[in-house]
């Protein structure tokens, strides 16, 4: 669920995004994140570690439940998203692409980190975007338990819905610690996902150009 853009005819426009996935409201707190009960998270972390047979009475581990709670709260925290858009006065109609945007998130299945780089681009229509916003988009949607597939699609869908470009493209390359440090222990393996829309999806040349510039052949 996303808000509709409120576009003015000229000048920079801020598009505020208030609703997270699954309808969780992000309204009402100053930093745009849902309410976090750090004390409850700390108690639960202590119970969790104790249940795994880890004794918390050493100096090294005494404060670990609190550190765990704050670390996860940080992973799920993101400032509210504001997409500043500008009129495309020059009629620029070639690809705009931000490459190698670093991101980190946690997998929804194991709550273990996965991280990598995102390549996010679009073919401008009537409006263009402040360049840093492509990175902010990724950061925003990464600040929650994720799957790589969903993160890829959410960034592309949001860009599509809010900017209404002629096409949008997102490629993510990531290493999943739940695949490298446990399970199959496929150390060094990366997963690539992509989501394309509009002309970037339908036109073979635009698609090939985007994938080549994103470094995915
Ligand atoms: Zn996982």
Image (cartoon, rainbow, N blue to C red):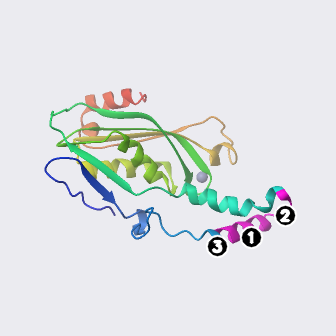
Reply above or below: 180 against 110: above
Q: Nearer the viewer, residue 23 or 206?
A: 23
**Which element carries disc 1, helix, strand or loop?**
helix
Give the main secondary structure of the magenta stretch.
Answer: helix
How far is disc 3 from disc 2 in space, using C-alphas? 19 Å
When asked about the image quadrant of residue 3, the answer is bottom left
Residue 174 on image: x %, y %: 53, 40
- In the picture, the disc for residue 47 is 1
**Does the stretch in magenta take in 57?**
yes
How far is disc 2 from disc 1 in space, using C-alphas? 10 Å
How far is disc 1 from disc 3 in space, using C-alphas? 11 Å
**Does the stretch in magenta take in 63?**
no
Q: Which residues are magenta?
A: 40-59
- Tag 2 near tag 1, CB within 8 Å: no
Q: Quarter of the image containing the C terminus? A: top left
**Which element carries disc 2, helix, strand or loop?**
loop
Residue 108 on image: x %, y %: 55, 57
Comes first in the chain, label 1 or label 3: 3
Comes first in the chain, label 3 or label 2: 3
10 Å crowding of disc 2: few (<14), some (14-19), many (20+)? few
10 Å crowding of disc 1: few (<14), some (14-19), many (20+)? some
Would residue 63 be found to the left or right of residue 156 on screen?
Answer: right
In this rendering, the count of numbered labels is 3
Residue 150 on image: x %, y %: 44, 52
Would residue 165 be found to the left or right of residue 134 on screen?
Answer: left
Q: Nearer the viewer, mark 3 or mark 2?
A: 3
- In the picture, the disc for residue 139 is none
When asked about the image quadrant of residue 176, the answer is top right
* Residue at figure coordinates x 16%, y 53% from the top left: 8
Residue 128 on image: x %, y %: 24, 41
Residue under pointer 3: 40
């Amino acid at each position: 669920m996303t808000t509709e853009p409120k576009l003015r005819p000229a000048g920079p426009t801020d598009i505020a995004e208030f609703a997270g996935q699954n309808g969780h409201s992000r309204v009402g707190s100053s930093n745009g994140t849902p309410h976090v009960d750090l004390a409850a998270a700390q108690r639960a972390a202590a119970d969790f570690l104790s249940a795994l047979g880890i004794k918390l009475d050493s100096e090294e581990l005494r404060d670990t439940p609190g550190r765990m709670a704050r670390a996860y709260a940080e992973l799920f925290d993101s400032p509210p998203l504001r997409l500043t858009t500008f009129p495309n006065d020059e009629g620029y109609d070639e690809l705009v692409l931000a490459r190698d945007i670093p991101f980190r998130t946690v997998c929804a299945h194991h709550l273990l980190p996965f991280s990598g780089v995102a390549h996010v681009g679009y073919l401008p229509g009537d409006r263009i975007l402040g360049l840093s916003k492509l990175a902010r988009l990724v950061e925003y949607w990464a600040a929650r338990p994720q799957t790589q597939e969903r993160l890829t699609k959410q960034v592309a869908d949001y860009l599509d819905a809010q900017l209404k470009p002629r096409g949008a493209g997102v490629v993510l390359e990531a290493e999943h610690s739940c695949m490298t440090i446990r399970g199959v222990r496929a150390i060094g393996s990366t997963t690539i996902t992509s989501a394309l829309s509009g002309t970037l999806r339908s036109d073979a040349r635009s698609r090939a150009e985007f994938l080549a510039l994103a470094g995915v052949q």
